[in-house]
Each structure stands twice: as C-alpha cells, then as structure tokens.
Amino acid sequence: MPVVILLIFPLIIAFISLFLKSQKSYALVVRSASAICMLISVCFVMNYFNSIVTFDLFEFEWLKTVVLAVEVLMVAYIIYTAFKRKSPLVGIFALVQILLVFYFEFGPARTMHIESSIFIDRFSLLMILIIGVIGSLICVYAVEYMKDYHRHHKEIKDRRNIFFAVLFVFLSAMFGIVIFNDMSMILFCWEITSFCSFILISYTKTAEAIKNSLFALTINVGGGLAFTLGLVIIAQCYGVGDFISYLALSHNSGTVMLATLLFVLAGLTKAAQMPFSRWLLGAMVAPTPSSALLHSSTMVKAGVYLIIRISPQLGNNIPGITTSLIGIITFLVAAFIAVSQSDAKKILAYSTISNLGLIVSCAGINTAESLWAAILLVVFHAIAKSLLFLTVGSTEHQLGSRDVEDMDGLYRISPVLTMFLVIGIAGMFLAPFGMLISKWAAMKAFLDSGNALILLFVAFGSTVTLFFWTKWMGNLVANAHVTEPQKYIMRIDEKVSLYCLAGLVIIVCIFYPIISGSFIIPYLDENMYIDFMTMISKADDLIIKGMISILFLMPIGLIPLYRKYRVKRTSVYLSGENTGDNESFHGSMGKDVKFELKNLYLNDIFGEKIWSGKTKVLSAGILITGFCIIIGGMIF
C-alpha cells in the first residue's frame, strides 16, 4: 500500500542509520534513501492526483496500542529529562498531556467511529511534495556538511548516526501530519516532530544547546497539550475525533470556538509565532541541515498547515480575529527585528517568523483569496528559505563566519555560493519571484475582505522586509575587502542540493499557475464551495513572464559585449591615500586605518530589546482575551 510505504520507508532508513559508522556508509545510505524518498513522494502524488482518497489504516487494534506505547515512552523520557535538567514545566506539560490522551483513548474514543483515518486531498499532496523533495535534498546536503562540521568542531562528539536517524523519523512524522484525518494520530506525529527538534537542537550537548532544546521542547509540548485539550473537548461534547467531522461542526458554537482556539494555539507554538517565537531563535544553535529542515522548510510549516487546515472554523469569529491579529503583528515586528541583525541565521530565523505570521493572518480571515495566498506563500517560502539556510551553512564553513558583514568578499571566493544566496534572497522579496506574487495576492485578499488595517501592516512590513534583504544582497556584490581570490571546492552533495533548490526557486516562479491550477484552486473549490477565480490577471501574468524572460535573455544578450570588454584592475580609490592593499588607508593622524564598509542596523529603532518583550505581552494579551471572551460567552 503506497501510504504505508510513505510512512514506513523513512522509519526503516532511520533504524538502519543507527548502525552506520563510516562516512562511506552514511553517504551510500542517505543518498540512496533520499533519492528513493523523493521518488516515492512524486509517485504517490501522481497515483492519487485525480481523486480525494479516504480509507482506514487502523483495521487492527494492535496498531493503536503500539502508537500509545510509543507515546508513553516519549513522555517518560521527557519527564526524566525534565527531572534531570531541573526543568519542571515541560515535565508537567507532558504528564498532563499523557493523562488526557489516556482519558481520550479509554473514554470518548471507545464509542467513537472514525470511518477514514487517512484523508488525502490536493493540499495534502502539495505538502507531501514539499516534505519529500525538499526534505530529501536537505538530507543529501547533510552528508558532506556533517563530515565537515565535525572536522571543524573536533570537541563535539560525532553522533551522526543519531542525527540522520532523527532526520528520517522526522520526515515520516511530517508525512503523517499531512495525510492523517484521525486527530489522535496527527497529535502523535505532532509530538514526534517536537521530540525530533529537541534531539537535534541539543546535538552538540553544550550548555547553550541543552538550554535552548529544553525551552523549545517546553513550548512545543505546551502546544501539544493545547491540541490534546481541544481534541478531548470536541470528542467529549460532540463525539468526533477527526478533521472531517470537526470541520462540519458549527463554527459559532462556544464549545467549538474554544476547541478551535486551542488548535490555533498549538499551531502558533509550532510556527514560532508571538509570544512563542524565542524557541526558534534558540534552535539556530543546531547544525545547519536541521535548521533548514525542521526550523524553516517543514516543521514550522506543520503549524501553519494546521491553521490553514482548520480555517473553515475561522473567519469572522473570535478564533479567526485572534489568529489574524497575532499573525499580522508577528509579521510586522519580526521584520523590524530582522533589520537590526547581522548574523545570517538570525536574519533567516526572524524572516521565517515574519513570513509565517503573514500565512497565519491569511488563514485567520478565511477567504478563498487569502487561503490561495497562504498556500502559495508556504510553497515559495519553503523552497527559498531552505536554499538560503543551506547556502549560509556552506558559507560559514568557507569564511569561518556567518555574519553578513563578512560576506562582502564572497564573490571572489565562491561565485557559485554568491549566486545561490542572491537567488534565494531575490526569491524572498524581488519581482518577479514568488514571494512578491504571494504578498501581492495577500494584500488584495485583505483589501477585498475589508481588513484595511491588516493591509496597512502588510504594506509597511513588506517595506521593512525590502530593507534587510537589500542590505544583505548589497554586501554580496560589494566585493570590498578581498585582495586575492581563494579557491572553494564544492562537494557533490552540496552541488546536488543547492543547484536543485536554486532551480526550484526559479521553476516554481515560472510555473506557479500550474501549481495554483493543479493543487490550490481544486482544494479551495472543494472546501470553500465557490467557483474560485485566479488571483493574477492575464495581463499581470504576462508582465511576470516578461520579467522572468528578461532575467534569462539579458545575460545572454550581453555575452557579445562581455567578450570585447577588457577589465583594467586598479586600486580602490580612498581619497588618494590607499596603502596599496585595498584594505587600509593613510589616516590624518599619521596612522594606517582599516577601510570598513558596513550596513546600517538601526538598533535604537528596530532592536530586539525594544520590540520583542512588548510584542510578546501584546500577543499574549490578545490570545488570553480571545479565550476569556469565548469562555465568558459559554458561562453567561
């Protein structure tokens, strides 16, 4: 059965990975498994493309028993870790959650019948492609990266067998999240992703890594507890435990709204939205492949996937308004803070939080236009941000730094890495690349739905986004501090992953109408019960295609001129006082002064300390207010 293969194959590879010892064995197993995983994902999508698939995977009761046993073992380990590391809150969350799970399994679930534990529609298929293709490319990249990582960090114990095992377990869990209709199974897979994140963040076993991994686990287990509580409420009150039945309930019922806001809370924690965003920043201590896989392209997408999936219960009600407000505030403030950062990973982390905030806000208003924009944002963001994270990892190994101020000479060291960074950055903010198309669609959706205030937030936040991406791109082409070019040899795993991801950034931009027509619009037609019209007019589509053509035709057209062009290399002009090395000049006090070219970071305006605390209080206040209004309405 294809579904079983999709779920089980990564688990088999994870088990095999535990016994690998040499670089050759890692390379053979991970490369082969990643290629097969991509092939399985593509074949799965082709096989189920023409119909919605529903069936029951749990005909045998022992499967549920195995799942429950794994949950108990996971919780036991979390409680043990909480006791060992003196972090009681995560232990309390885990204990309460497993008690609720037992109550659900031996209470409401006994009298509940779920006809289809599996539900696969076009949105599920699109997510399977993202997980299977992008996730597998990241695993391939990790083969040589982790070898190089341990060469640079000899003080860190080599536990690559566990690292790769966890990556493949994570892929299986992500597949489960997007294909299960049974909410107890989604919760199980949800908790596995949180557990995988905890293991990978703590990979180095340094004090900082352990602290950050425990904080991430606390936030995500807390989100899992909210998910469990929402599931228990709808199971106890309505006798349902699956998405299809839940989405059919009245979205104006107080009990349903309470459960919905609990599901939203779970999604907000996983997607690192305010006030829960700090765990994602702490997760950046993990090796780059885990940052790309878990904290950019897939794990955080589980949070927005859940919110998009439950969007029929959102809209013009308390959960919908709460979701939209938190999402748009996160979008704006995270973009502000990104301006003040020079660490490339922090810029990527804050921009991830920001873009996920826009997706959450789009899902919150629940219109066909906003959901179209949200799903397209998921696709473009997953690809472009994976490319950027992986390229930053390679750049850090080459330069010994991931500060963008140290990247102004990258072009002379590695034009290829520079090209990948430029493509990834352009994909995030520059016309005609996909993120700009999606943001334009989001703005139109907010305008058409009468959300003028949110529209202003999007417009201003997008302007701020332009600022920090342009600073980084400008540094890459500045070429200010390099005297002699160095040689950088790109390994095969880097080439395969980075070239494929860079190609995908361009391909999805050119063929986004096919993605829209094949996956997004059919999903919206099935769930919004309307004849959905495309967001981009034919005239705008022609303009986009024309701009894409220029990107390819202009360099080709300049080839004849380039062949005749002769460069005369001269010293950098420094008011006639260049010392001759292009790096310093004779100062007015008779001393040689190092020439510096630095960006503006405006810490006194956009600094993390200025915005982070206030925004967390505001977001928490909005969330608490939403719960108080719903509970108050139920009581009175």
Image (cartoon, rainbow, N blue to C red):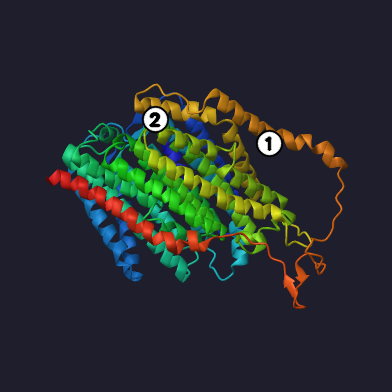
Q: Is residue 211 left or right of residue 497?
A: left
- Quarter of the image with the N terminus in it: top left
Percent position of residue 480, x then y = 73, 59
Q: In this view, does 276 lie to the left or right of 104?
A: right
- Name the amino acid, label 2: Ala
Q: Work out whether residue 138 or residue 442 is closer to the camera in this orientation and state it.
A: 442
- Name the amino acid, label 1: Leu
Q: Which residue lies furthest to the top in this view?
A: 531
Residue 69: in sight, yes or no?
no
**In terms of sequence position, does the residue under pointer 1 or pointer 2 come before the other?**
2
Label 2 element class: helix
Percent position of residue 369, x then y = 42, 31
- Quarter of the image with the C terminus in it: top left
Q: Which residue sits at x=44%, y=46%?
A: 356
Percent position of residue 181, x then y = 33, 36
As drawn, the label of residue 132 is none
Q: Which residue sits at x=24%, y=41%?
A: 257
Q: Which residue sits at x=43%, y=45%?
A: 457
Disc 2: which residue: 368
- In three-dimensional space, the C-alpha distance between marks 1 and 2, rounded to whole angstroms, equals 32 Å
Disc 1: which residue: 551
Neighbor class of circle 1 (other Cα within 10 Å; few <14, some 14-19, many 20+) is few
Image: 277 above or below 105: below
Q: How many labels does the image show?
A: 2
Q: Which residue sits at x=23%, y=49%?
A: 627
Q: Work out whether residue 83 or residue 613 is closer to the camera in this orientation and state it.
A: 613
Q: In this view, does 111 lie to the left or right of 425?
A: left
